[in-house]
Amino acid sequence: MSSPSRRNHAHSAVSTDSQLATSAVPHSKHPLSPRSASKSAGAAKVPTLGRRLLAWSLEIALLAGSTVGPFYLGHVVNQRAVNRSAELAPALQEIQQQGAKILGISPRSLPTQVTPLTNLLWTASLGLPFLLTLGHLYTLGRSGRSAPKRWLGLQVLAVNGQMPGVGRALVRELVGKWGSPLILAYGVWQVSGAFPVVSIFVGLAGLALIGESLTGLGSRSRRAWHDWLAGTCVVDQNTGAMIHLSSLWQGEPKMTAGLGQFSDWVQTAGPRSVIINPDRAGWRATDLTLPKIGVGLGLLITLGGLIGVGGYFLLGRPASFPLSAAEESLYGNLVSTLTNPELDPAARRAAVLALGNLPDERVTPLLVDLIAQTDDSLWLDALQQALIARGPEAFPALRRLNRGLAADLTMPGPALRQTTITRLETVNRIITKLLLLETGDRSTTLDLSRMNLGAIAEADSNFRLELKNQNLSNINWQGSILAQAQFEGARFYSLGPDTHPDTYDDRTADLSGADLSYANLSGADLTLAQLVNSGLVHTNLTRANLTLADLSGANLEDASLIQAVLSQANLAEARLSKANLTEAQLLSTHLTGARLAEVKAAGARLIGANFQGAVAIAAQFHSADFSQAAMANADLSGANLQNANLRNADLSGVSFRDADLRGAGLQGAVIADTDFAGAILTELPGISEGGFVEAVPNLAPGNQYSGVDFSRGRNLSTEQLSFICAQGGIHSACGNIAPGLP
């Protein structure tokens, strides 16, 4: 049994510890009311680990909700809108593009046309979390309590017992709690092979955030990584005791001695030496100096970045190094030689060739200007060789001259027409040879838009662009004339540095609005290519790969697409009349409103295609596969659909007037307001010259239409119903029709 003195001493120690613990929390200006004190006391009864994790979860939920909520509402509004009349706001476009680059999202999935309300909601999805973050950092720095922490009776303090301040709050929240885990998750996502599946990154990010919040379990002080980095700790706002995470296995919150026991020492030792619950002496300096070092490094990096970006935009790219005195003298002599008409032409041509190898940015414009001033074939040949030696830097000047010469051809003046054509042909040959010499993937887009690179066949001129089997990805051909170009086996698509298909860095060609009539693109790789409103009349696209290409509004009349791959391509409102799509692959292809009159598509695969509103009058779809296709309101009048697969297709409002449906599979198809007027369902009876029926239709029982419901079909004749009922179809008239002729 202990002595009275020991009991009194223990009682005194407990009282002292309690008083010190209570005095640890800085006094607020307004003491807690009994009601608020009872609330805090109630909150303190919640297990410590649960309180911290719950506060952390609430903070994330508030931030995520402020982003996801408005974004989802804007997405729903945009999806349901009939008319998206507004351009995506410039700030949203920039953020969208940068986010797509980081996450490897395909640019084709990025919206450009939205509704005004969508713009407002998506702007709010950026503004609200930004404002919440600012408020969170401010209140955490000034009072040590965010809203969730205040609700749960928690407080963040610096290890010297003072409020954290905004600087520590920045390091704790943005660097320690969010930045480090997300950067780690992103790195793992990139190197693990899971890129570019965004859902996996989201999962990794969640695990990293949870893991970071539990890092305190590995140290005796139970302070998580973000607290150690910022020199802070979490305390109970009522008692001032540091909260331990050891309650995970002990069941009850364990609290160390409060900050009050260090209060006198804080005043004498200073903040750099003060530690709450010191477990390792090494933490004495780093708890307070490390955040300062981190903030300093961050400021230096930010300042360096601003200087670099500002220098780039203010000064532009660094100019080429100035020529030496000898090189400057050589340049002057060569220019004097080639511009002196009294000198020997051979000497002048030699000067042109020498200029082509001189490292001076003045050379290219000079040589291009000379092309516009001569029609001498030898002189043009020398200029051609010199400009080819200049390499890709010659493209901008050649593009300007090409467009100027093409404009001259439209102006009156037939006397100069042949000279203009000769010069244009020279420019186009230079461009062709430069493209042939260029190998490898282009890191930047080459602009060849709105140029006239079409075939020239007049008098002695005979030019046709020939770039067979070349890598032509990342070139802007928008609006260019490429008639009769030979692109057989050419690649208009290549993978970007991440080596994954359909991501932001993929290199694709833009052929929107280009004239490719009569061009040869057989076997070409046009994956993801932009061919919006392009002219492809009589173009050879046999066995070409057009997966995910955008051909909306394109003119493909009489084009050859035999065995071409157009899976998931966009052919909305495209014109395909008389095109040859024999055995083409159109899986999940978008053909809404397309014009396919008299198209040849025997054996084509249109599984899951969107064929709504398409017009395919008199089209040849013999043995084609339309299974699971959306064909509502399509016009297939007079089409040949013998042995076609229409199973599980949506045939609502489809017109099969006079169509040939012999042997077509219709199991599972949706037949509603479908027009069968004059449709051929079985072998026609033979008709003699006198107009008499020689044989009756085959109405032998079968199962061709077993389970197919024709009840909502329109314009079904008695003969058609006889065959439908004989083949196991469902219709209200089937019970009234006897086998054989009606």
Image: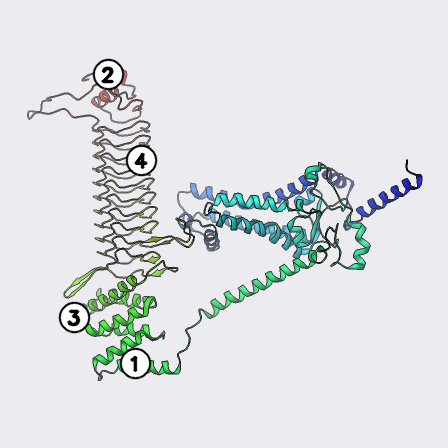
C-alpha gap between disc 4 and disc 3: 57 Å
- Residue 284: assigned label: none
**Residue occupied by mark 1:** 334
Task: Give the residue at x 46% y 43%.
Answer: 75
Q: Secondary structure at mark 4?
A: loop
CA separation, marks 1 and 4? 69 Å
What's the residue type where badge 1 is placed? Leu
Residue position for label 3: 415
Q: Nearer the viewer, residue 523 or 611?
A: 523
Assess disc 2: are there few (<14), some (14-19) or many (≥20) residues with their C-alpha within 10 Å of its C-alpha: some
Q: Is residue 65 visible?
A: no
For the view shown, which residue lies furthest in the right direction? 4
State if disc 3 and disc 4 touch (CB < 8 Å): no
On residue 631, the disc is 4
Kind of residue at badge 3: Ala
Q: Name the residue that disc number 2 marks.
A: 737
The secondary structure type at the circle numbered 3 is helix
Q: Are marks 2 and 1 in contact (CB under 8 Å)?
A: no
Is residue 458 at least partly visible in the picture? Answer: yes
x, y percent for residue 625: 28, 35
Residue ID at (71%, 56%): 282
Residue found at x 73% / y 59%: 272
Nearer the camera: disc 1 or disc 4:
1
Query: Residue 635: percent from the left, percent from the top?
Result: 26, 36
Of the 4 image quadrants, the one containing the C terminus is top left
